[in-house]
């Protein structure tokens, strides 16, 4: 008589409580009766899948029988059956979303093991979804990433089959390493790191033997093409019209470097050897380093077809490499090649092979082509195991570094017979070393400092990388700890030249380049707060300081708010030194220096615009050079800051006025309020005092303002009155100088008014 109102027949009614075992049984019945996807039941299946995820998460934390039922009925098999039909993206998206939510929220390990035990998850991973649909792609890669967070030494065996050498979670994910969507690429990088972190020897051996070389080869190839795109953007955007695109490209390169460093820091021997080999011979050497001196390459057809980037981009990217990557075999080898390789290493294949072999054992070719299509398997020409290669690189590179150090020690160590000559800087010429010569040549700021800034950053980053052996740096850049009486005179002279140019009128050297040069000089010539600079170099720095002082006097005479600006720049300088890591994250510095603030570029990274900014630049240059002079022992700080806050009177401070000149007055504010006060004027401040009722001859400061911020005008109608305005101190954060006080001061007679005005 009564027919069921259920959509599904069978007399099954939907339970009122959605969080119950009965509700899951109801959903199971829905799936059982709708195993074939059709237009009429797609919406129903989507809602059912969503509800299943919700109740399973609840059951995981509250009722174990819910999961027992889910596993007993093998409900994951329904997911597979639905997927294998042409169900459309609408159902697939919900199915992947359900799986993602489910695995993301499960906390009970037993429940997780049960879900993974029947291999349905691996079947879902290898299913051929329609990845042309962006939503399907997004939820699929998110699902894989979620699974990777569940990996550990216990769960890895649900994904990696040692007997069949099959690891679909990893192998399917790395297929999307170069996907057009950055979100997908980031997810793949996260997943691979989660895999590498699992300490399972058989799994890591599978990755090292089967996938490491092709994956890293493809990754390096992708990074190389990305770098060429970045270089093209820099070359074609002299007018700052593509800043957004350039910022994205720089951010992507930084992400790549951090990802590579994360892999190397896991210290997985076989993976690190493969990755280091690929990076050195297919990216860093042929694209980054050779772009520093492309004119020295040989004339063969292979070399002529090799791509290059501009010197600006090459220096910028190498700086980022040394700032981020710390893996010693990689960065030490790269630094050795930059600092020590000679021109014969480039022009002759055999010599090139010897040069790279000395720093790092290499594949049997001189300098492999970059950005050629990556090979799918490990290079068969590698005759040595990676452990053997690792031993060779350290033996040869370290031997070279020790020999270098020994040579320098012989040259630089003070002896009894030639003590005076040992105080001279070691010239350490760069002639014959094309890459080092190119870096030194880039320090020429005669026209501008566009390229010089990146050369400075590269020298800084190499000198501060813990993976680069100190003995290598001692030869060219910085003094050895046991040999304090020498430094690279050639480099010092170029740095001093930058400082001298920055102190000239209308200089094209930006403040950031000046600060970088000063930092390198201090690193080169200071040891334990003692300077080892030669007298001639000290005199040159002192000359630059005098030049900057002369420029400062020019603006002091012409700018009314000079003292305010000086104090603000001094306070800005005391906030801290330049952060080179942050500087190398700024894509704006890749574009030619501009003099307009309309670009939004920070003041220190561009040229000044207008008289006000030229004043600021001159002040800051003076402070920087003065600070360098003092650090080298040419004076102590006893004049700055101009205003010592601790010596100034503060509001509500009680003052002894017994020996002070007090002038009584009435302060009339703009709203008509009249207040009786005593005016006190000292060397720096105007002070309004109220008598202290408890102590005779004492008063309480009710207002204080600096005299440099004061404006006063007489009243043409009343000789007893002065109109006084006290402005707030100048700050870049307060462009509109709202007054602290604007009032009429009425004195008892015109004599007292004249006395106050004179003071």
Image: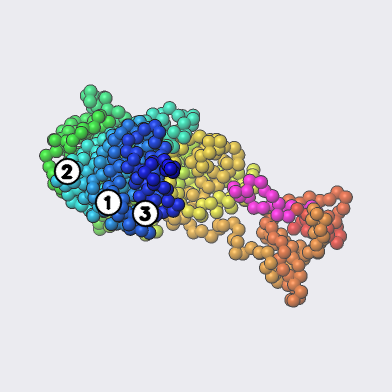
Q: Which residue is mark 1?
A: 72
Helix, strand or loop at label 2? It is: loop
Q: Residues within 10 Å of mark 3 (few under 14, many from 20)?
A: many
* Marks 1 and 2 close (CB-CB < 8 Å): no
Q: Nearer the viewer, mark 1 or mark 2?
A: 1
Nearer to us of marks 3 and 2 is 3
**Whether residue 511 can be seen here:** yes
Residue 441, position as x, y percentages in the image: 36, 36
Query: Of helix, strand and loop, which one carries label 1?
Result: helix
Range of magenta residues: 722-741
**Can you give x and y, in whole percent of width and height, for residue 94 in the image?**
38, 40
- The residue lying furthest to the right in this view is 717
Identity of the residue drawn at 16% across and 47% down = 162
Is residue 375 shown left or right of residue 240?
left
Residue reaching furthest to the front: 1
Q: In the structure shown, which secondary structural element does the residue marked by tag 3 occupy? A: helix
The residue positioned 60% from the left and 39% from the top of the image is 611
Residue at mark 3 to residue at mark 2: CA–CA distance? 39 Å
Q: Going 39% across and 41% down the picture, which residue do you hit?
A: 8
């Amino acid at each position: 008589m009564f027919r069921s109102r259920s959509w599904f027949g069978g007399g099954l009614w939907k339970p009122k409580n959605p969080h119950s075992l009965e509700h899951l049984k109801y959903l199971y019945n829905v799936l059982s009766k709708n195993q074939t996807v059709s237009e009429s039941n797609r919406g129903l299946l989507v809602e059912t899948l969503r509800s299943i995820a919700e109740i399973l998460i609840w059951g995981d934390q509250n009722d174990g029988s819910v999961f027992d039922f889910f596993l007993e009925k093998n409900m994951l098999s329904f997911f597979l059956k639905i997927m294998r039909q042409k169900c459309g993206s609408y159902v697939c998206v919900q199915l992947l979303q359900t799986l993602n939510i489910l695995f993301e929220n499960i906390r009970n390990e037993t429940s997780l093991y049960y879900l993974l035990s029947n291999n349905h998850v691996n079947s879902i991973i290898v299913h051929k979804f329609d990845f042309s649909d962006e939503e399907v792609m997004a939820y699929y890669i998110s699902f894989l990433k979620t699974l990777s967070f569940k990996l550990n030494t216990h769960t890895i065996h649900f994904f990696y089959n040692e007997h069949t050498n099959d690891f679909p979670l990893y192998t399917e994910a790395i297929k999307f390493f170069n996907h057009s969507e950055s979100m997908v690429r980031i997810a793949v990088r996260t997943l691979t790191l989660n895999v590498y972190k699992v300490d399972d020897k058989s799994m890591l051996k599978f990755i090292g033997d089967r996938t490491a070389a092709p994956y890293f080869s493809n990754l390096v190839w992708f990074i190389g093409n990305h770098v060429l795109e970045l270089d093209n953007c820099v070359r074609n955007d002299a007018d700052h019209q593509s800043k957004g695109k350039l910022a994205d490209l720089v951010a992507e390169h930084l992400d790549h470097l951090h990802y590579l460093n994360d892999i190397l820091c896991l210290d997985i021997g076989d993976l690190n050897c493969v990755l280091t080999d690929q990076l050195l011979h297919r990216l860093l050497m042929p694209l980054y380093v050779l772009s520093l001196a492309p004119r020295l390459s040989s004339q063969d057809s292979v070399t002529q077809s090799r791509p290059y980037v501009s010197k600006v981009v090459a220096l910028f990217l190498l700086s980022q490499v040394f700032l981020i990557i710390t893996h010693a075999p990689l960065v030490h080898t790269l630094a050795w090649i930059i600092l020590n390789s000679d021109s014969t290493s480039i022009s002759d294949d055999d010599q090139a092979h010897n040069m790279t072999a000395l720093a790092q054992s290499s594949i049997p070719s001189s300098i492999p082509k970059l950005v050629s299509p990556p090979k799918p398997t490990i290079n068969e020409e590698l005759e040595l195991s990676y452990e053997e290669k690792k031993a060779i690189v350290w033996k040869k590179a370290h031997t070279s570094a020790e020999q270098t150090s020994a040579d320098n020690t012989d040259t630089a160590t003070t002896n009894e017979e030639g003590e005076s000559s040992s105080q001279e800087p070691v010239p350490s010429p760069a002639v014959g070393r094309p890459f080092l010569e190119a870096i030194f040549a880039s320090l020429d700021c005669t026209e501008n400092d566009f390229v010089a800034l990146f050369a400075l950053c590269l020298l800084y980053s190499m000198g501060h990388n813990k993976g680069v052996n100190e003995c290598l740096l001692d030869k060219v850049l910085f003094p050895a700890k046991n040999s304090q009486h020498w430094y690279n005179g050639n480099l010092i002279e170029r740095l001093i030249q930058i400082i001298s140019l920055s102190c000239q009128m209308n200089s094209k050297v930006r403040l950031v380049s000046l600060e970088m040069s000063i930092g390198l000089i201090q690193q080169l010539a200071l040891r334990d707060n003692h300077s080892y600079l030669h007298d001639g170099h000290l005199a040159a720095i002192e000359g630059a300081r005098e030049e900057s002082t002369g420029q400062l006097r020019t603006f002091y005479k012409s700018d009314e708010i000079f003292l305010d600006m000086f104090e603000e720049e001094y306070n800005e300088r005391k906030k801290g030194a330049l952060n080179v890591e942050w500087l190398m994250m700024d894509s704006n510095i890749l574009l030619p220096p501009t003099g307009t603030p309309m670009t939004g570029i920070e003041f220190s990274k561009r040229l000044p615009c207008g008289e006000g900014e030229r004043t600021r630049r001159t002040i800051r240059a003076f402070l920087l050079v003065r600070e360098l002079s003092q650090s080298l022992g040419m004076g102590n700080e006893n004049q700055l800051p101009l205003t010592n806050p601790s010596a100034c009177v503060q509001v509500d401070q009680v003052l002894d006025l017994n020996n002070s000149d007090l002038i009584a007055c009435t302060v009339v504010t703009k709203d008509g309020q009249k207040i009786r006060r005593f005016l006190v004027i000292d060397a720096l401040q105007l002070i309004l005092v109220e008598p202290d009722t408890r102590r005779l001859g004492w008063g309480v400061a009710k207002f204080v303002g600096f005299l440099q911020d004061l404006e006063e005008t007489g009243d043409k109608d009343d000789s007893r009155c002065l109109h006084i305005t006290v402005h707030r101190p100048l700050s870049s954060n307060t462009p509109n100088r709202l007054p602290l006080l604007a009032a009429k001061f009425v004195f008892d007679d015109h004599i007292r008014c004249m006395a106050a005005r004179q003071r």
